[in-house]
Amino acid sequence: MASVVSSSFSRTRFLLHSPPRTITRFNSLKMVTRSCLDDSSSLLRAAQYTVDTYVKSGMIVGLGSGHASGMAIQHLGCQLRTGNLKDIVGIPMSVASASEAAKAGIPLDTYQDSSQIDFAFDDADVIEEGTLVAIIGRRKLQSEESIVQEKSILNAANKLVFIIEENQYKVGLEGSVPVLVQSLNWMPIAEEIEDIFLGDAEVWRRSSIGLAGPLGGDYPLVTREGHNVLDIIFTSPIVSLAEVAKSLDKVYGVVDHGVISKIPCTVVIASHNGQRILDKLTADIVS
């Protein structure tokens, strides 16, 4: 990780910054509607395990976004229809998860700052091995979706489970970290962030349409709260995701970011040999 540098960053250098050699783009994953038993994949089994193990009747449940969360939502709906679970209320983290939950027959409520959430599950883009610090928000957001709401629900939950595949749990994470910034003065914020990670990362403003270069083109993505999304694209492995989050939290104009570090937290890793269950408190296999 590069150290913070004190010199001001040249706007010209940011504008003319050449693109990195390799950039991984993360497109949105459509949530999949499935019947109760029509898929035997390891990810589906992990989603089913999550619902069967952690969701109890009477709970208020935060419903995540992504492929695994879509499977978990469908299984939760199945459990409600068969009477194995009762009196569940879902709090969707996105428009997609709300739609999926409605199709599954799950009663829904909207998130408020005072919401009491018993349990939440979600996809993570990647999780740092040993620390269980996660990144969310790499996939392309729709304008009505919100990293702020997703993160608020995750942080409000008494218990949180991420459902991922084996290749999403690794040491030395690479790729991008999304950052929400004030849209009116996004350029100076981007310059300061690129100064912090000088030599290790580049900063691109996310476009709402396709690939549009570092500045986000003519149609930069604007979230429903009115923020721009900056993608910090790391060109070398991230030494410490927690340190990245700490650095971003100190930047004036950064509203939030996609780094999640929460206790208690459990990670369910889909494996062909069953599920690996990791606990936040120890980052060791607990069952």
Image (spheres, rainbow, N blue to C red):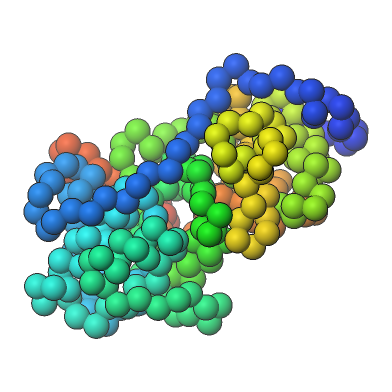
**86 and 183: which is toward the camera:** 183
Q: How many numbered discs?
A: 0
- Residue 53: quarter of image: bottom left
- Residue 214: quarter of image: top right
Give the percent coordinates (x, y) of residue 247.
71, 46
Give the percent coordinates (x, y) of residue 142.
51, 51
Specify whether 102 is left or right of 157.
left
- Quadrant of the frame with the N terminus: top right
- Let me know if residue 132 appears in the view: yes
Residue under the point 53% across and 82% down: 114
Relative to 25, say whether 61 is above or below. Answer: below
Q: Residue furthest top?
A: 21
Relative to 149, say whether 181 is above or below. Answer: above
Residue under the point 58% across and 31% down: 211
Residue under the point 87% across and 27% down: 12
Give the percent coordinates (x, y) of residue 59.
30, 78
Give the percent coordinates (x, y) of residue 237.
56, 28
Relative to 248, say whether 234 is above or below. Answer: above
- Let me know if residue 278 appears in the view: no
**13 and 287: which is toward the camera:** 13
Relative to 172, say whether 31 is above or below. Answer: below
Specify whether 247 is left or right of 100.
right
